[in-house]
Image: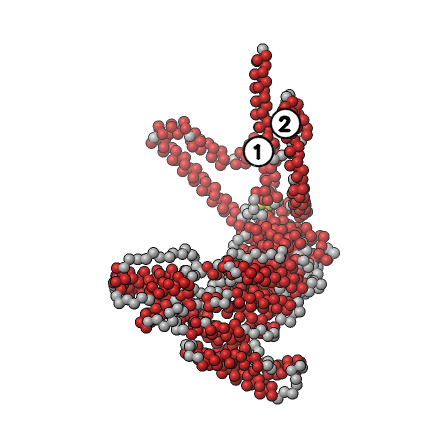
Amino acid sequence: MGKIKKSTKKVDIQALKKQRRFQKKVVKGRQVSEKSMANFREVESEEEEELQLEEKQPIRNTKIVSNEQEDDEMDGEDNEGEEEDEDEEEEDEEVEVELDSKDKELANKKDKKEVGKDSEKTKSLKEQITQHKKDLEELKKKDPKLFEFLGENDKELLNFNTEMGAEDDDDEESEEDDDDEDDGEEGENKKEKKQKEVLTSALLDSWISEANKNTTVQSVKKLVVAFRCASHAGSDLKEVEKVPYRILNSAVFNRTLLICLENMPKFFDKLLDYDSVKHSDEENTDANNKTELPSSSKKWNLVKSCASSYIRSIIQLLTQVSESKLLLIILKGLEKVICYSSCFTKYSKMLLKHLLNNWSSSEESVRIIAFLCIRKQAILCPFPFIDGCLKGIYLNFVRNSKFVNTTSLPLINFMCNCVIEIYGLDFASSYRSAFVYVRQLAVHLRNSLNTNTKESFQNIYNWQFINSVRAWVEVLSAYPGQEQISQLLYPITQIVIGMINLIPSSKFLPLRFHCIRFLNRLAESNGSFINCTPYLLDVLEYSEMKQKPGKSGKNGGGSGGNGKDSAASNSKKSKLINFYTTLSVTGQQLNSKEFQDGMLSQFTELLVENLSCFNYHIGFPELTTPVILHLKKALKSKQYRPKVLSDIQEILEAIEKTSKLVKQQRDQVSFSPKETKQIQAFSDALKEKYKITPLKQLLLTIKKKSKQLQQTLIESTKTYNYEDDEEEDEDEEDDEENYDDDDEEQEDDEEQEDDDEDLYHEDEEQEKQPTKKSKTIAKQPKKPKFKVERNGNDDDMVEDLVLSDDE
């Protein structure tokens, strides 16, 4: 008997272990109460198991104690979210309206379109039912065995007659029977759903006429409820259940949106005796002189619940709608109600997120209205809100300016103008925001100067960094007289000069021209002296300005015949270079005629532009003496091309003529250089007397040519290139020459993708070996090619800049 008892004890222990494992799986992720643990211990009889439980219990308690703070934080967030939801539900309950007998009659009336649709649906269903019955009868006659087989295996198909007949005869009775069979809770939910009335056009018209005749709070609440029902039409089932009315027709949906978006601001203004149009037009940009909001009126408590419900429904629409036309209508309606949304900080922040998203990713018309709404929010909302507007506008501009080409350049210009406009509203907050981001740009530049790696250089030499610098340059040049913003002039100029000196290579000459253009813009607008001539005269020392196109730096002269052939091939295959949409060029483009001509035109334009900023100053002759000496030295040397020498001669003549004019006027003056006011008066008088100096006239002619060239470059991207077809027709004459030309074109394409100049020169030396016949090259064995899998020029590619407020 003793042995039997031992075996029973073992069996009980195993059962208890299984029970414990099962309970651990069920109770996982929940806190076990002390009562349940005590009951669980009473079932266990052995002392060893009790000890194991006592050892495990403090471990579980330590986990709970360690996570107490996290649980408290999560509970706090959940409680806040629940409180906000409860507040919104209470406001919705306040806005809800009970229907009168007339309203119920109008709700039961169906529109003509709805009745027509319902009749068409019922007719189509009846036709399908009769057709199915006929098919079953024909099947029974033709193949009775198959009919019996279907009766045994698929009874639902044959019982179609009775089921569908019963549904057609009496739909309401079947719905009532289903309600009786379901549980109590489901029955109650279905009754609630049945109690929801349908919002028809007749009911909507009655509400609008009532609001136009007598604009009371009750009449406005009805329209707010209708708009809320329309905004939740395409949302989840849980949100749809909260809405008191149903919208079944698309025409009713469109009418409710249009009518409410147009008329609700008028009704709110009548109830509060407030003029939203007048107050929104007043642009008091100072932080202390804000316009009066509707919340300042005594009747605000009457309209507060309606206004909050209306704004929440607009936010709901913005989350759902993606079509540009419907977004345009919603944003136009939102622009009229921003003075009311600015009374609620929570809703204004939610609206700002949606508006920034539409401003940075939608069509042009939607972008414009979204920015107007953001601007009104920044003006009307209380003080801290403008900081979020400034931050969001700048960061979205930087994110959307990674790539620049002829198609994206107008969009980037528009966004840059929006940044300029929003940063001119409040200069105190604009200075704080600008200081943070300018400092971050300086930190990025300092890190790249200290590390001296390719990746660090690419973090600076990319479109995202350059467009961010350009934004601050444009902001400083748009508001030159402001004391707070003008303090950032020196750090911005130092950042631009650091970008120029980072890699002084001819490969990055387009980027240097961008930076010099920024400096000229700052000097012209702010009236400060920024000397860019050393960085421009340095361009004359590059070999690309001296040598003829098509010749490399290593083999300057080369053989006569091969040099011409290489120049012809480069001129055919190289494309026009747009210096406004490029930052760097490849090794093959450096030797092309298009790049060298563009480099010369950029050099002349920027040099004349920089000198014309100071051509009315009293010290202009002394400023231009080193430039004149340098240009005369270049004319004496015979290293440059004739086109370069002719342009230098033209610039030199214009500089000398303007300096003579200034000297003539300066000789008639008797005041000393210390008298700054008289010096400023001298420059103003010279501007009035000589509105167009020879140097300025030359600048105007150069800019006209550059505009024409820019238009041709934009059109060249759209037109078809017929040169490729001509080359194919010429190559079809000889099969062997076609094979050789294809190999050379592949090698040239690989050289464009490869950024290393040494590889380019090695391949070029191999190509320049003297050959008399192309057949001998075809017979030679092919050499292995160096392939690089890249989508484009890696110099313009870079990871995203990390822009934040932490630094």
Q: Residue 179 carries which label?
A: 1
Left or right of 797 on screen, residue 299: right
Q: Which quarter of the rendered picture does the C terminus lie within?
A: bottom right
The answer to which quarter of the image holds residue 295 is: bottom right
Q: Which quarter of the rendered picture does the N terminus lie within?
A: top right
Residue type for callout 1: Asp
Tell me the residue at 38%/56% (across/down): 787
The answer to which quarter of the image holds residue 25 is: top right
Q: Do the residues labelled 2 and 1 touch (CB within 8 Å)?
A: no
* Residue 169 in picture, x, y percent from top left: 50, 35
The residue to which callout 2 is attached is: 52
Q: How far apart are marks 2 and 1 (CA)?
A: 53 Å
Label 2 element class: helix
- In the displayed structure, would residue 242 be above or below residue 516? above
Left or right of 289 on screen, residue 110: left
* Residue 677 in picture, x, y percent from top left: 67, 80
* Residue 767 in picture, x, y percent from top left: 33, 64
* Viewer-nearest residue: 412 or 372: 412
| Residue 682 seen in the figure | yes
Q: Residue furthest top?
A: 1
Residue type for callout 2: Gln
Tell me the residue at 59%/12% (across/down): 2
